Image: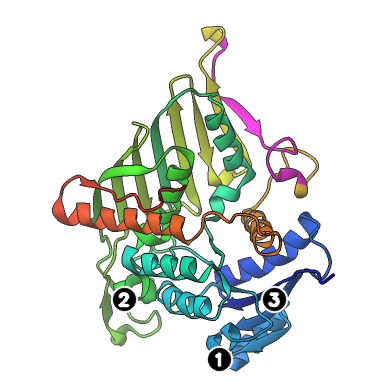
């Protein structure tokens, strides 16, 4: 009997491409994926020389300077897209047309129309899709989902979420593709708030309406950090995004994201209030969860600090003892495990392109609300979530 394999073609070897490459190796070890069933087959990058160098560094068997040749290679089963945002659509549609499964980093597309086109092409072709909203793969967040689902904190009434980082806080950092709408779409909204929106809908309920505000704080940036005479580029997308939201279950929420928040490195956090208790999570201490249950003696009530361990989802695959903590790349390894199960064993994959399109729809609604200065209703595209 022929053993089914997952042979991966990776497009892009930057920050996220490296994270994916590490995760493939970690997933094999952590989840005991049988030897020979997961292959890092080919890596594509901007030039043949760069691709060859990165393939050697990241453990891929072959390389190419043309992502189209990777997509049409008969020994590739799944195309992993870690290229800049503006390339996601073109690469994904070409991969789908070639009959390949697609694993794409977020945001799926620059806008909801493109995301919808990608989703419907994949569904017509019958290929599997997965999008890299990796924070929901964290064992701590999985445990939070379990607590909410079984009613430990009662009915959820409020979600407060923040995703702040400081990677563009310095106004003298040079202009880049991330600051241009044609290449990045929106700014902090696409880059950071997309994670927060997906997390909120996963933990609480679909977002059905919202009111939002966007702001560019550093309106101009130098075109070069080394040449003062090079001039400046005008920033086209948001440094900060704020929104009020209403969920389908009646809960309310506030979400904010910033790429200029000094001191915040991976400042994703949320507080969920229920009728019987509350949850608090901070990604910068990603293996801890604070839980408050409103019962017992009021004198001794308080938040309980839970150190996630082997008793919680997926943690045991990495460590046999609580308190040691996991990391960003471990969440990616859980994501790869899910990808492997989906491709090799035909398990459902989520969040897929349809779920990611719903995120794009919400982000487009944020822009609409900002432009109209009003509450807007959110289309429910992912009705089977």
Residue 5 falls inside the magenta stretch:
no
What crowding class fits label 1: few (fewer than 14 Cα within 10 Å), some (14-19), or many (20 or more)?
few
Looking at the image, is 343 positioned above or below residue 233? Answer: above
Q: On the rendered structure, is 332 left or right of 87? A: right
Picture coordinates of residue 233 (x, y %)? Answer: 27, 78
**Helix, strand or loop under label 3:** helix
Q: Is residue 160 visible?
A: yes
Identify the residue at horizontal 45%, vertical 55% (top origin): 355
Picture coordinates of residue 285 (x, y %)? Answer: 59, 43
Judging depth in this view, the residue of 298 and 362 nearest the camera is 362
Q: Which residue is mark 2?
A: 182
Q: Which residue is mark 3?
A: 58
Task: Give the farthest residue toward the bottom.
Answer: 48
Mark positioned earlier in the residue sequence (2 or 3): 3
- The stretch of residues the image draws in magenta is 300-316
Q: Which residue is mark 1?
A: 47
């Amino acid at each position: 009997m022929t053993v089914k394999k997952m042979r991966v073609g990776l497009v892009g070897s930057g920050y996220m491409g490296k994270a994916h490459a590490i995760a493939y190796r970690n997933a094999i070890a952590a989840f005991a994926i049988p030897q020979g069933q997961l292959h890092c087959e080919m890596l594509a990058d901007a030039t043949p020389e760069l691709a060859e160098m990165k393939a050697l560094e990241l453990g891929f068997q072959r390389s190419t300077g043309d992502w189209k040749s990777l997509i049409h290679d008969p020994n590739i089963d799944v195309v992993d897209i870690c290229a800049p945002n503006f390339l996601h659509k073109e690469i994904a549609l070409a991969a789908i047309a070639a009959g390949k499964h697609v694993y794409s980093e977020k945001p799926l597309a620059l806008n909801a129309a493109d995301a919808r086109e990608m989703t419907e092409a994949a569904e017509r072709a019958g290929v599997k899709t997965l999008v890299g909203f990796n924070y929901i793969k964290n064992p701590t967040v999985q445990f939070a989902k379990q607590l909410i689902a079984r009613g430990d904190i009662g009915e959820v009434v409020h979600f407060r979420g923040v995703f702040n980082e400081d990677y563009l806080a310095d106004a003298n950092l040079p202009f880049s593709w991330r600051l241009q709408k044609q290449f990045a779409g929106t700014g902090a909204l696409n880059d950071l708030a997309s994670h927060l929106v997906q997390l909120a809908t996963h933990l609480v309920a679909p977002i059905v309406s919202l009111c939002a505000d966007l702001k560019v704080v550093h309106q101009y940036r130098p075109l070069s950090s080394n040449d003062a005479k090079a001039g400046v580029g005008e920033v086209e997308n948001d440094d900060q995004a704020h929104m009020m939201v209403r969920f389908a279950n009646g809960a309310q929420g506030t979400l904010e994201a910033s790429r200029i928040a000094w001191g915040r490195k991976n400042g994703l956090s949320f507080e969920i209030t229920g009728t019987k208790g509350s949850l608090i999570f901070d990604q910068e201490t990603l293996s801890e969860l604070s839980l408050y249950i409103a019962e017992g003696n009021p004198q001794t009530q308080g938040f309980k600090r839970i150190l996630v361990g082997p008793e919680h989802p997926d943690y045991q695959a990495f460590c046999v003892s609580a308190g040691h903590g996991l990391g960003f790349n471990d969440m990616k390894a859980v994501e790869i495990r899910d990808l492997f199960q989906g491709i090799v064993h035909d398990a459902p994959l989520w969040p897929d392109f349809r779920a990611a399109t719903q995120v794009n729809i919400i982000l487009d609604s944020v822009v609409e609300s900002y432009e109209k200065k009003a509450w807007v209703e959110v289309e429910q595209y992912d009705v089977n979530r």
